[in-house]
């Protein structure tokens, strides 16, 4: 008999028909009962809810029934019936049960409920089986799908940028080297440095920190593109908002200025939040009830209000006048810390904020320079509970101005000559931004640690699973 997914049994029982025999397969969440009957809560990952299996003990072998414990995996054939009990509309009256795999109660780590998030991180191989992670992972899928749908519906092309690259787009120097050289026997140059000309690519290369520079090449030929892929940063910051391997979505649009860019960012994020509300309410309701009582309210709030748009200089004034003591003192020129960003969003405006026109010293070389000679046309989108969720800018399209920044920052021309040529041949105004996929997921799941919104987090000293 073909397998029925539990989501279909629960949501579409009318189409299947009450009284029909079905086959379901999944993992046991709990088993309770008495001398006559067992109630088994079965979950197959298709939905947060469990399907109740009712087994009359008279019909089943004792030894087999003993094997059914929390975590074991079953195939059940039985009749879909209206539930007698509270809490569910339908249940399955079992006719046949096969135990695919047992889970010894003495050693199964998820035998009990209510584990801490920290503990669950230590069992990354099993935590997708918990309700929390089921919800998070279904939302993660829904957001990835919605991202492709959003751009496809608007005529953007999905543009694949390389993961192995010789250029450091953000200039922060936090890259992982990719090499096939033998670390115990490194070829050396006469000056005693590692001779990467002997390496696989004949030069020093790393894992990319962003697809933007190559994305710009796509925008300056296809018009509207986006990338969506993994990016890597070797920053040793053990915070609840940083991963060493994270996913980023980077749209890049020819002829867009900074205002168009802000409009796109705001519309995009609101679309994604709305998509989650429209398609994942079961998961959101569970997370809202169990974890973060304001999750759904916060999501609806963000959709229904315009984001504040504000210059960096005004933001600094607000922070200075706030009278609040920050760990990092505020003055014009500083890179805003998460405490500053969150003050603006959560205390002052109580709304998402798009900050623009940052000092050029704290932003990347490619950002369009303002006429004041001090600031660049950057934009960061700041969100409640998260801080920066998007970073982007209008790009410097003037060859001479871009070249001047490249030289001031001592960026090796041999690494970025191809990027500079786009400003030599048919340059055009253009803009783009990067949305951190896991930061978005923090927002739509209410989770507070970024390690809990990706199946297998990569952070300093952590790459077990
Ligand atoms: O602000 P960032 O560094 O911008 C760029 O990489 C640009 N090239 C994007 C562009 O204009 N195309 O990173 C963009 C976003 C951040 O706003 C944040 O959401 C996320 O990526 N991000 C991280 N997420 C998780 N872990 C990290 N270590 C992150 N670093 C950045
Ligand atoms: Mg940034």
Image: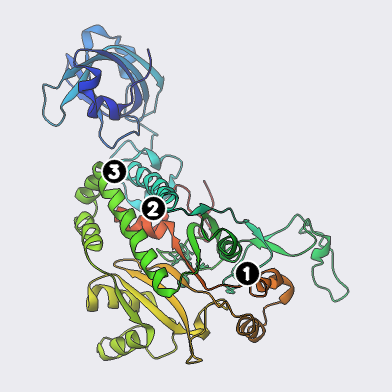
Local secondary structure at mark 3: helix
**Apparent side of residue 274 relative to residue 438 in the rendered image (left or right):** left
Residue 291: x and y in percent read 24, 52
Q: How is the image coloured?
A: rainbow
Q: Which mark is residue 120?
A: none
Label 3 vs label 2, nearer the camera: 3
Label 3 vs label 1, nearer the camera: 3
Whether disc 3's CB lies below 8 Å from ligand 1 is answered: no
What distance separates the C-alpha of mark 1 from that of mark 2? 28 Å
Residue 378: name its quadrant: bottom left
**Which quadrant, please, contains the N terminus?**
top left
Q: Is residue 151 above or below residue 419?
A: above
Which residue is the site of mark 2? Answer: 452
- Does the rendering let one see residue 298? yes
What distance separates the C-alpha of mark 3 from that of mark 1? 38 Å
Residue 246: x and y in percent read 49, 57
User: In this view, which residue lies farthest toward the top?
Assistant: 59
- Badge 2: few (under 14), some or many (20 or more) residues near its Cα, within 10 Å? many
Which residue is the site of mark 3? Answer: 279
Which residue is the site of mark 1? Answer: 168
Local secondary structure at mark 1: loop
Specify which label sits upstream in the sequence, 1 or 2: 1
Residue 189: x and y in percent read 86, 71
């Amino acid at each position: 008999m073909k397998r029925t997914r539990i989501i279909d049994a629960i949501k579409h029982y009318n189409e299947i028909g009450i009284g029909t025999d079905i086959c379901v397969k999944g993992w046991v969440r709990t088993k309770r009962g008495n001398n006559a009957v067992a109630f088994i809560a079965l979950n197959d990952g298709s939905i947060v809810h469990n399907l109740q299996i009712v087994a009359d003990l008279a019909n089943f072998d004792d030894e087999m029934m003993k094997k059914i414990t929390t975590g074991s995996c079953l195939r059940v054939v039985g009749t879909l019936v209206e539930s007698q009990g509270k809490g569910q509309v339908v249940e399955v009256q079992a006719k046949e049960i096969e135990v695919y795999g047992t889970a010894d109660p003495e050693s199964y780590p998820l035998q009990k409920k209510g584990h801490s998030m920290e503990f669950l991180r230590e069992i990354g191989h099993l935590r997708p089986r918990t309700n929390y992670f089921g919800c998070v992972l279904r939302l993660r899928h829904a957001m990835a799908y919605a991202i492709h749908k959003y751009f496809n519906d608007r005529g953007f092309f999905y543009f694949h940028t390389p993961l192995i690259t010789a250029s450091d787009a953000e200039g922060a120097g936090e890259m992982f080297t990719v090499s096939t050289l033998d670390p115990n026997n490194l070829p050396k140059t006469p000056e005693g440095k590692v001779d990467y000309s002997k390496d696989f690519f004949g030069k020093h290369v790393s894992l990319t920190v962003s697809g933007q520079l190559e994305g710009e090449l796509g925008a300056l030929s296809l018009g509207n593109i986006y990338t969506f892929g993994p990016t890597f940063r070797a920053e040793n910051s053990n915070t609840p908002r940083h991963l060493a391997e994270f996913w980023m979505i980077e749209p890049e649009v020819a002829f867009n200025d900074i205002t168009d860019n802000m409009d796109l960012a705001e519309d995009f994020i609101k679309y994604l939040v709305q998509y989650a509300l429209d398609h994942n309410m079961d998961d959101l309701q569970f997370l809202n009830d169990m974890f973060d009582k304001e999750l759904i309210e916060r999501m609806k709030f963000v959709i229904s209000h315009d984001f504040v748009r504000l210059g960096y200089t005004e933001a600094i004034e607000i922070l200075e006048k706030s009278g609040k003591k920050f760990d990092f003192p505020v003055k014009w020129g500083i890179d805003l810390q998460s405490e500053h960003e969150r003050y603006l969003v959560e205390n002052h405006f109580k709304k998402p904020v798009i900050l623009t026109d940052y000092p050029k010293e704290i932003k990347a070389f490619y950002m369009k320079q303002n006429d004041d000679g001090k600031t660049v046309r950057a934009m960061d989108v700041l969100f409640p509970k998260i801080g920066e969720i998007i970073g982007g800018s209008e790009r410097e399209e003037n060859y001479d101005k871009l070249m001047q920044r490249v030289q001031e920052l001592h960026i090796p021309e041999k690494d970025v000559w191809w990027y500079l040529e786009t400003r030599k041949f048919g340059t055009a105004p253009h803009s783009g931004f990067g949305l951190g996929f896991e930061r978005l997921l923090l927002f739509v799941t209410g989770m507070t640690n970024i390690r809990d919104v990706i199946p297998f987090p990569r952070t300093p000293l952590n790459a077990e699973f």
